[in-house]
Image (cartoon, rainbow, N blue to C red):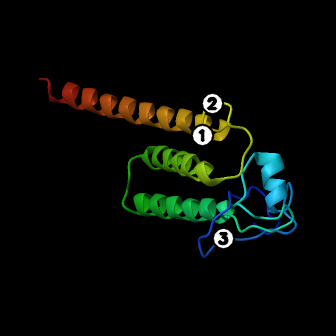
Amino acid sequence: FLVGDDYGVPTDLPWGVAFPVGLPGPTTAGYLASEYGIAPPPGTAPSELLRVHPTQLYETAAGLLVWWVGVRMIRRGAASGRTAVLSFGLLAAARFAVEFVRAKDDRFFGPLTLAQVLSLGVVAAMAGLALWAASRRRRAGDAAEEP
């Protein structure tokens, strides 16, 4: 956030931030149009600095929320691995959501970015692990009940 890296698309929300010197470039109307194909509001000069979504802060907030959920699960005695699977899945889901408002030029998969496709893969893998673990527990419980 402090270097203006990976910012979002323009916004009128009160928490929008302008990056006069961002990475990879400033959030001017001309730069956003030339690098990301983001059409500026009509009548906007190319040199005008636009406020954008602070996606870095969105991801930080999501990460802290996932950490909080993980800590609560551990303190409540969650089964081994359950906290990790849920945390990875939640982090991937958060990244998937944030990518919708991030200024990106790598939408190779229709409206989805590469990070979103990878996030979907992580969510699918975590869901698969959770289902596999649940079926193992169920089979172990069934075997223990047999005389």
Q: Counting residues from the N terminus, which is met first, the one under dot 3 or under dot 2?
A: 3
Q: Amino acid at mark 3?
A: Gly
Q: Which mark is residue 116?
A: 1
* Residue denoted by label 3: 16
Tell me if 32 is positioned left or right of 55 in this view: right
Q: Amino acid at mark 1?
A: Gln
Q: Counting residues from the N terminus, which is met first, the one under dot 2 or under dot 1?
A: 2
Closest to the observer, 40 or 114: 40
* Quarter the C terminus occupies: top left
- Kind of element beneath mark 1: helix
Q: Please state the horizontal and vertical placement of residue 95, each as a whole percent of the image.
A: 59, 49
Mark nearer the viewer, 2 or 1: 2
Q: Residue at x 63, y 30 (%)?
A: 109
Closest to the observer, 136 or 30: 30
Q: Please state the horizontal and vertical placement of residue 108, each as a whole percent of the image.
A: 68, 31
Q: Amino acid at mark 2?
A: Phe
Q: Counting residues from the N terminus, which is met first, the one under dot 1 or under dot 3?
A: 3
Q: Are marks 2 and 1 in contact (CB under 8 Å)?
A: yes
